[in-house]
Image (tube, rainbow, N blue to C red):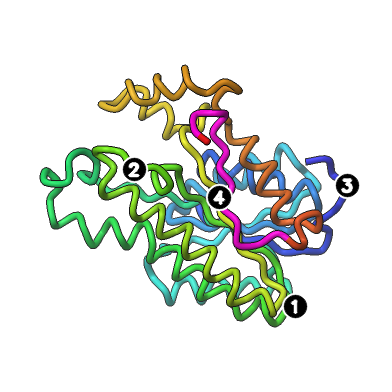
Amino acid sequence: MSGAGKLEGQVALVAGGAGGVGRRVAAALAGEGASVTLLGRSEAGLREAQAALAAAQPSGVFETIACDLRDYAACRAAAETLEARFGRLDVVVNCANTPVAGVGGAFEGVDPAAFTPFLEASLTTLFNLCHAALPAMKRGGGGAVLAFASDSGRFAAPNQTMIGPTRAAIMMFCRSLALEVAGAGVRVNCISTSFVRGTPVFDQVMAGPIASRAQTAVRRAGLGLPDADDLARLALFLAGPDAAHLTGQVISVNGGVSA
């Protein structure tokens, strides 16, 4: 966020860019000179985020595309629109987090009707985004793909039987894809979190049935729980030239909750 221009002339796509983490990631990338397009389902939410970002960074370039990541054709159209508009696509960040009701708690209590929608929201969205964006990134000579997961994919826990495997799948997808596309100059990394304070999701958790788990994490985090800016700074590093030889990694940012 120093404004040193490490991403000057580059084009970034931030899926979930209207959310708490996505908005800070977008600000960080723009602060280093990238033209940033926010991707999300809600046109109103995107417009609000765009206006707020532009007001805070008048010199930044912020655009929006309304897109449901579960729709592959829409993802491909978004990537093609960006390439046509800017001539390139360098950075793709997936911060999107589409909630699906009823997937928490004991597995036997989960309604099977939620299985497919949850897998689509957790994995298909990432697959669609990457598959749609990679051709443009390769034509431009490379770039950086960043995905967000959670530490539930690293550590087994009761009542996480639906959530944990999908987060582990995101991690392995990033690691495997990184090896496939390294020769084209594309780097793929994953940021894993526990609880992220100061976000709407964290506020919902603290007011919900697993508030005690979040409170335990607060006590265990010797460095304090990270906030969205902590994640944005890491995303900026991973997207930039200082991480030119870093790919296929899963980096956990949890303040010391686990190791």
Q: Which residue is mark 1?
A: 141
Q: Residues within 10 Å of mark 2 (few under 14, many from 20)?
A: few
The answer to the question of whether label 1 and label 2 lie on touching residues, with beta carbons closer than 8 A, is no
In terms of depth relative to the viewer, which is nearer, 189 or 15?
189
Q: In the displayed image of the protein, which residue is found farthest to the front?
A: 259
Q: CA distance from mark 3 to mark 4?
A: 22 Å
The residue under label 4 is which amino acid type? Gly
Where residue 232 sits, quadrant-wise, is top right
Q: Which disc is residue 17 wearing?
A: 4
Q: CA distance from mark 1 to mark 2?
A: 39 Å
**N-term-proximal mark, 1 vs 2:** 1
Q: Which residue is mark 2?
A: 156
Q: Residues within 10 Å of mark 1 (few under 14, many from 20)?
A: few
Q: CA distance from mark 2 to mark 4?
A: 29 Å
In terms of depth relative to the viewer, which is nearer, 74 or 210?
210
Q: In the displayed image of the protein, which residue is found farthest to the right?
A: 4
- Helix, strand or loop under label 2: loop
Q: CA distance from mark 2 to mark 3?
A: 41 Å
The residue under label 3 is which amino acid type? Ala
Up/down of 250 relative to 196, above or below: below
Residues rendered magenta in the picture: 246-258
| Main secondary structure of the magenta stretch | loop
